[in-house]
Image: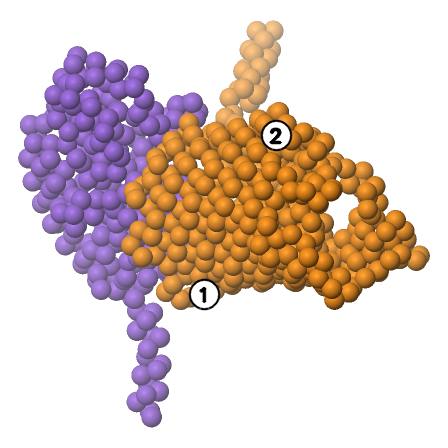
Chain colours: A orange, B purple
Amino acid sequence: MKKLLLLALSGALVYGEVVGVIPANKRTFDQSQYIPDISVVLDASYVNRNKTNDELQHLELPGVAHALLGSHEHDGANHATYNADQGFNLNYAELVFSSNVDPFLTMDAILHFSKNGVEVEEAYFTSTALGHGLRARAGKLLSNFGYLNAQHHHYWDFGDMPLVYEAFLGSHGINELGAQIQWTAPTPIYMMAGFEVLQGENEQMFGNATIGDIEDPIAKGKDAPSLFVGYAKTSFDLGDTTFFGGLSYAQGSSRIDHSDDEESPHAFTGDSKLYGADLVILHAFDSYSSLKWQSEWLSREMKGTQYSDATLSTSSAMKKQQSGLYTQLIYTHDQNWKFGARYEAICHNDVKVNGVNTNKPRDFRKYSAMIEYHTSEFARFRLQYNRNDSLYNEDGFKQTIDTIMLQANISIGAHGAHSF
Amino acid sequence: MKKLLTLLTLLPLTLLAHLNIAVSYPYIGALTKSIGGEHINTVVLAKGNWDPHFVIPRPSLITKVRNADALIMNGGQLEIGWLPPLINRAGNPRTSPRASSFLNLSHHIELINKPVDVDRKDGDIHPDGNPHFHLNPNNILLLAGVIKKFLISLDHEHQEVYEKNYASFLSSWSEKIKGWEQKMAAKKGMKVIQFHDNLAYFNQAYGLQNIGTIEPLPGIPPSSKHTFKIIELIKEQKPCCILHDVYHSTKTAEYISSKTGIKIVLMPHDINSLESIDDLGSLFDHLTEAVQ
């Protein structure tokens, strides 16, 4: 009996040891060490404008873009730009995952949670082992066209997108499904060239979907991928000043369908080309203080057929040639304070219908200034003022929109460092 | 013609003979050069007179990583804010962290001040411990051995040269260590204030005692509340001096000094951080001289 008791006791002891003592990292199938880098970036703003939300929705850049600011319904979905509403805005809570996949690949996923639902901002895999300065990437991605396009909103120096980008490409820029290959040359100075094949579904400028009834379409669709982007960039340093410049080109088919719009429905089909030139000059005074001058020029040509009137039965040959730029100066005083000013213009707006110039306005201007305070690298608060002198109302009168915006951009978790 | 052909075939060989090694900081470059000698070229990415935590990831640095045969970094998360995007952009498998031609020096040193709790409310702390380990001259010896092994693994052919260079470095550096120890012997137990605790390993080597930092928490700029606390601390504990790095503004230190009369001593952290410091020896000569 005694023996039996002893046996049971020792058995219990052994069992107890097995259950309680093995440390977490020795559990056979424990995978907690494989958790990818996870971060959440919150971007929220308080906006005060001299125009109501309703007024804003009906303003346009004649011949370039309409419904640029504010939010509007399209295909049953709500499309809102950043900082769309008067008062408080939750631009997004951005969830970022990134990790090595295996010895050959990394993967990143950037998800935007907002009142519009969840948007896959980016989700792509990137090669790490091709060698020869080559890097390949595929998935949903921000194109490396120009300078600003590949950067996430939370890294921008202003809370809104430059006018010329937003008017030509919409508030997400060229953000597409596709594949990208980039090559850094083995030269002593930095030279990079890249090429992208993209689906081509930008709603402002590119597109390939059939317009109208499938049986009897107004304009037939085009096979995707239908957008091709190429660019070359170079950079060098002179002392503590870095010069970085690039030339970009995008070409694709356009199918822009506003046939369901309540006011003046229209559609466009044709081919479009977009040219970009960018220059960034950064002078660093010390480890924490710098002056950065960043400018981009964009020019586009859209050639095709415009369908107008209620039934879209009237068609006319249309050719748009438009260009604009932004230029901004950012002074980083120290780890806490940043100051910036930006000037923007769309100064070329030739819209020819059946060969006749429609004499659209070309005096679109916008001015911005901002002050930023960082409590640390992970939290910044920005006060921004915009004077938007670019929008026209339905009667063809130019409106001036003044906006004061207080923006908070906060991040937690493990977030990778940003490139130049 | 034949001569030209042989010349042409020899040309790539002579190019190969030089290992092109990218290193994150100047001290690594100098150390690697003293072991590698004429068989290697070192390309230093960060400037010595700037904050090693904050380096602008200039595209020109991508080119330097892209064209390198190997990469040596400090590690301990010192480069986390700038080196990963360069490696990612360079598309060079030889400088990928899993490559045998990639060396993380922090893996070979026992880091001190490893935090028990890692939370950003405590500032921008290094979860692996204090990464400024090269400021203990005894660690330089360990690192020299690590770099010697690394170079031999990359280039067996010149093993003897690397062994020889290492041996001569070892003997001359050991001599220097003795000199610095003599110079610093009387300073044991001396209390100091710093801006950021980047002299932790120097203090460890010579028994100096850091009693406070001007920044309230790592990576958080000085606040008036904390500055007054430091002033009180100085009045109470009478530390000898403020050991100040060369890249932060000395404005707050000067204010503290004007209130307490404490001396401010500029302490270089790397080669080229002050004009007079052009090699590893002069770095420690200066550091040990400055605190006298």
Identify the mark nearer the N-term, 1 or 2: 2
**Side (left or right) of B228 relative to A391:** left
Distance between the Cα atoms at labels 1 and 2? 50 Å
Is disc 1 in the same subunit as disc 2? yes
- Residue drawn at 68 percent across, 57 percent down: A359
Which of the two residues, A160 or B276, is positioned nearer the viewer here? A160
In the displayed orientation, state which residue is furthest to the bottom.
B1
Percent coordinates x, y for residue B209 in the rendering:
19, 24
What's the amino acid at mark 1? Ala
The answer to whether B33 appears left or right of B92 in the picture is left
Residue type at numbered disc 2? Asn
What residue does disc 2 label?
A: A50
Q: Which residue is mark 1?
A: A185
The chain under label 2 reads: A
Q: Position of residue A235 (x, y in %)?
A: 41, 59
Q: Are marks 1 and 2 in contact (CB under 8 Å)?
A: no
Q: Residue at x 32, y 71 (%)?
A: B15
| Nearest to the observer: residue A357 or residue B65 | A357
Tell me which residue sits at (33%, 91%) in the image: B2
Q: Quadrant of residue B38?
A: bottom left
Residue drawn at point x = 49 percent, y = 30 percent: A383
Rendering coords of residue A166 (x, y %)? 62, 46
Q: Can you see residue A226?
A: no
Give left or right: position of B79 versus B168. Answer: right
Q: Which mark is residue B225?
A: none
Q: Secondary structure at mark 2?
A: loop
Q: Secondary structure at mark 1?
A: loop
Count every numbered label the image shows and give the total: 2
Task: Write down the chain letter for disc 1.
Answer: A
Image location of residue B208, percent across then percent down: 16, 26
- Closer to the camera, A265 or A334? A265
